[in-house]
Amino acid sequence: MAIKLILHHVGAVVRVIKKMRDRDCFWWEDRCECSLKNGGYVIGWFGVIYRSAAIFTLAVLIPEMEDEDDYVRVMLLSILLTYFFISLAANFLLIVGLSKKHPNYLLPYLGIYGVEILVLLASLLGGIILIVKMVSARILYYFVPCGLLIIGSYAYCWSLLVRLFHEFRQASVETSSLTSQLSDCGYVKFRCSCFKSDSLYVVT
């Protein structure tokens, strides 16, 4: 009798601890998702600010260069201006996707961010080659860490957005499957009610 009582209390304590652990896990998951989402908002609005500033700067510089008949620079800056407009639109889509938790809205900015990381890597390698051939190699002690820091920051932000994309996609898949299950249950209930009404009609 005493052993059963002890086992009963031990089981009750274990169940309470398990409930507390599950509650803490859910709280941590919610907090983690909230932190990721806030980080995504910071990335999105920071991108809106600096891309808008770049667009304003290029819009001021291009007419001045047209007066100097520097067509090559004007063409390059016009291409860069077009790119900043496209990336700004992707920035706004990112913010909308974060607010709606829609994964597809994050895809344009993920693609643009990935291209920017590749461009930064290529620029870092090209800069290292030029510095070694044309300038003193001592500059590499400053150039390489700064370049790696920038690329690492970009890669970290990109990985954060990728995690958000996977979480939103998983949530949307679970929501759609739940909706389909509920619709199937409603259809089955409707068929059962129709069958019952037909049976009553036959009996009467």
Image (cartoon, rainbow, N blue to C red):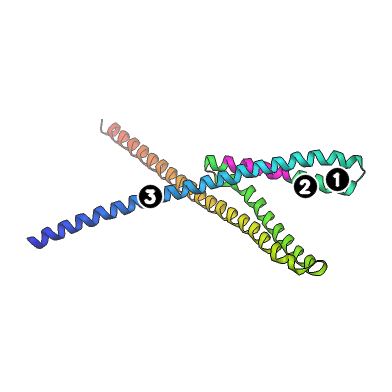
Task: Measure how far apart labels 2 and 3 are at the Cα level.
Answer: 45 Å
Q: Residue 71: image x %, image y %? A: 90, 46
SS at badge 3: helix
Instruction: Check whether the beta carbons of the residues at disc 1 and disc 3 lie within 8 A of each other.
Output: no
Q: Residue furthest right?
A: 69
User: Quadrant of the image for the C terminus?
Assistant: top left
Splitting the image into 4 quarters, where does residue 68 fall? Answer: top right
Q: Is residue 56 left or right of residue 101?
A: right
The disc, 1 or 3, on the residue closer to the chain's N-terminal end is 3
The dot on residue 26 is: 3
Sequence order check: which comes first, mark 1 or mark 2?
A: 1
Instruction: Depth check: give the residue in front, 116 or 90.
Output: 116
| Amino acid type, mark 3 | Phe
Residue name at image x 53 percent, y 50 percent:
164
> Which image quadrant for residue 196?
top left
Residue type, numbered disc 2: Leu
Residue most toward the left? Answer: 1
User: In this view of the protein, which residue sits in the foreground, 37 or 133?
Assistant: 133
Where is residue 136 drawn, in percent x and y?
A: 78, 68
Label 1: which residue?
74
Left or right: residue 119 versus residue 161 is right
